[in-house]
């Protein structure tokens, strides 16, 4: 069989696996993220198609963060900042430091423990906003702080990515961290400056009547900003996130989203399955027990986060409980940190297996909590009050 | 009476209105165009679903609610004539040359004689826009002037 045929067969096989996972996700009502990872676990790494799959996975994580950046608007956040920032700080303090402790207890280095702490701290925006939509909870009192917390975590992920990748690349902790933040600031300044100076051509391209122009422009911008970001030693995902926030500030947000959605779906699926493939099966069995322990501890810390934030937000008791019960699922960000750790750290393989197992468990159980949040909250607090 | 607006990142926007009977009406406008209407009854902490509408259904019902007419609100070409004074709603298309340019750049007043009195856009309306206001596709520009001035303005907006 020629190398070319092997390549096509390998990509075709992966697409079939992705389709199977997506069908299974629909049939069971689950998020596809844990299923993609599970589907990837037993598969062998592609030989001929390694570059193609690698590029698609990179594009996937870039587009994922680009679209999150697009939704994220500093201006919109500022309106609620006074209430959201303390809530976000509580979220961070209740989860991240304990994640570091857990990482050290499991025998990881400080740096690997920081990657793990990031992975247990980030709730999954994808799984949670989907759950809120499906349960028709848009008007509920807890939904505003819930989605607001996820937005604050988006900022935290940008800073964490800059810090962790710089420190992992080597050097003294403080110096490398400061350099990372400086590079981040430089990238932000360049992007904002370019968007301002080139506003007219930019808007005309974005508003072009031809969807091909828009598509090619967007893919080019995302990939090239990713390249610039990677050249600076930050991850390409961070560059994509930043360019997303800049373009989200133009009036074309919805158009951009619609144009990129099919590519994002394909490439994000490739990213998750590639992460599953990369996990060493031999590492999975010893990771299961620690992953279960992480699941229990960090579902409880997210419950505590929700209860505290709900109380300080002035939510009624049932809404407060629903908030606490909705924050447990981890997903895309945790996988992103796991994949980065796998690529950059000596302890990568063990950490990736642990993060993979933890994300699959928390995505599955967290979705159950999210789905039954209302019933569980009633069980704790009591049913609706009758009309007085 | 005040309608409060809040962002629901990843979902859409939420509008709430306290009605005089003591209940809260909440409308969730999804980014997909779907609308969900809820009601918080007095003394209730949780909303009760009222109805769910598509974009088109919502527009049709909005017309009935606003004016008792079974015709959807037409935002593209509303025209009012008051003794030679014309008020017109002009939509900015993606390919228009005015996109990304300011009212000053375009010298709207010198070239057409018409005055831009407001720009309506989904991210928020701009009444009495200044000369630095930038036109974006999908904006609805509300313009006032004599008939030929308003026509000249429409012609300017239609250039690509």
Image (cartoon, coloured by chain):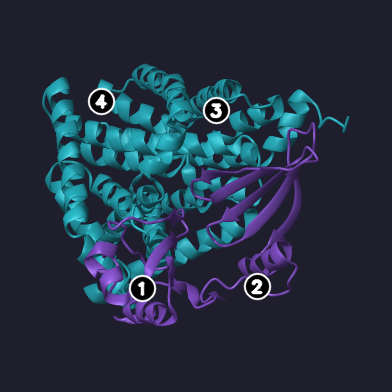
Chain colours: A cyan, B purple
Q: Which label sits on residue A111?
A: 4
Q: Which mark is residue B94?
A: 1
Q: Residues within 10 Å of mark 4 (few under 14, many from 20)?
A: many
Where does the image place residue A160, in percent across and percent down from the top left?
29, 32
> Mark 2 to mark 1: distance in Å?
24 Å
Of residues A331 and A191, the one nearer the viewer is A191
The secondary structure type at the circle numbered 3 is helix
Q: Does B76 appear above or below A106?
A: below
Q: Residue placed at 59% from the left, 25% from the top? A: A310
Residue bearing mark 2: B72
Report helix, strand or loop for mark 4. Answer: helix
Which numbered dot is residue A386?
none
Question: Compared to B46, does A219 lie above or below?
Answer: below
Check the residue under mark 1 and report the chain it is in.
B
Chain letter of the residue carrying label 4: A
Answer with left or right where residue A237 lies relative to residue A294: left
Mark 2 vs 1: CB contact within 8 A = no
As drawn, which residue projects farthest toward the front?
A: B83
Q: Do discs 2 and 4 share a chain?
A: no
**Which mark lies nearer to you, 2 or 4?**
2
The residues tagged by marks 1 and 4 sit, at their Cα atoms, a distance apart of 48 Å
> Which label sits in the foreground, 1 or 4?
1
Asked whether the viewer can see residue A335, the reply is no
**What's the residue at 61%, 66% (across, down)?**
B55
The tag earlier along the polypeptide, 2 or 1, is 2
Check contact, mark 3 vs mark 4: CB within 8 A.
Answer: no
- Of badges 3 and 2, the one in the foreground is 2
């Amino acid at each position: 069989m020629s190398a070319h045929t092997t390549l096509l067969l390998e990509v075709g096989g992966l697409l079939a696996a992705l389709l199977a996972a997506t069908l299974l996700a629909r049939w069971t009502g689950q998020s596809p993220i844990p299923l993609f990872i599970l589907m990837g676990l037993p598969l062998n790494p592609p030989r001929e198609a390694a570059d193609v799959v690698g590029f698609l996975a990179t594009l996937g994580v870039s587009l994922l963060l680009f679209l999150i950046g697009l939704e994220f608007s500093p201006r919109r956040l500022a309106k609620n900042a006074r209430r959201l920032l303390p809530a976000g700080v509580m979220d961070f303090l209740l989860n991240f430091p304990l994640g570091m402790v857990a990482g050290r207890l499991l025998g990881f280095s400080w740096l690997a423990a920081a990657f793990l702490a990031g992975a247990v701290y980030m709730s999954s925006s994808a799984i949670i906003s989907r759950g809120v939509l499906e349960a028709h909870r848009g008007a509920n009192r807890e939904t505003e702080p819930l989605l607001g917390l996820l937005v604050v975590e988006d900022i935290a992920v940008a800073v964490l990515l800059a810090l962790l990748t710089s420190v992992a690349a080597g050097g003294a902790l403080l110096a490398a961290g400061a350099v990372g933040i400086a590079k981040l600031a430089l990238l932000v300044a360049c992007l904002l400056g370019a968007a301002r100076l080139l506003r007219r051509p930019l808007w005309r391209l974005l508003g072009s009547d031809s969807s091909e122009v828009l598509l090619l422009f967007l893919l080019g911008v995302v990939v090239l900003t990713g390249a610039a970001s990677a050249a600076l030693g930050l991850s390409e995902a961070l560059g994509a996130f930043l360019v997303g926030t800049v373009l989200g500030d133009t009036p074309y947000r919805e158009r951009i989203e619609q144009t990129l959605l099919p590519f994002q779906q394909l490439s994000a699926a490739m990213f998750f399955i590639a992460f599953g493939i990369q996990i060493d099966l031999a590492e999975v069995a010893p990771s299961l027990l620690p992953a279960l322990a992480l699941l229990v501890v960090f579902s409880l810390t997210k419950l505590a986060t929700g209860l505290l934030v709900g109380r300080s937000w002035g939510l009624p008791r049932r809404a407060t409980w629903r908030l606490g019960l909705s924050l447990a699922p981890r997903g895309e960000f945790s996988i992103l940190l796991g994949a980065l750790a796998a690529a950059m750290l000596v302890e990568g393989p063990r950490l990736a297996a642990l993060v993979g197992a933890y994300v699959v468990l928390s995505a599955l159980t967290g979705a159950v909590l999210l789905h039954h949040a209302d019933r569980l909250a009633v069980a704790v607090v009591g049913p609706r009050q009758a009309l007085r | 009476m005040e309608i409060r607006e809040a962002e629901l990142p990843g979902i859409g926007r939420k509008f709430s209105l306290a009605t005089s009977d003591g209940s809260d009406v909440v409308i969730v406008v999804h980014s997909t165009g779907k609308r969900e209407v809820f009601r918080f009854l007095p003394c209730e902490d949780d909303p009760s679903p009222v109805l769910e509408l598509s974009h088109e259904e919502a527009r049709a019902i909005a017309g009935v609610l606003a004016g008792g007419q079974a015709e959807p609100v037409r935002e593209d070409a509303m025209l009012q004539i008051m003794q030679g004074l014309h008020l017109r709603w002009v939509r900015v298309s993606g390919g228009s040359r005015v996109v990304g340019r300011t009212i000053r750049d375009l010298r709207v007043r010198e070239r057409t004689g018409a005055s831009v009195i407001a720009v309506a856009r989904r991210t928020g309306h701009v009444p009495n826009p200044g000369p630095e206001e930038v036109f974006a596709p999908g904006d609805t520009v509300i313009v006032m002037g004599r008939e030929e001035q308003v026509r000249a303005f429409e012609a300017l907006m239609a250039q690509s």
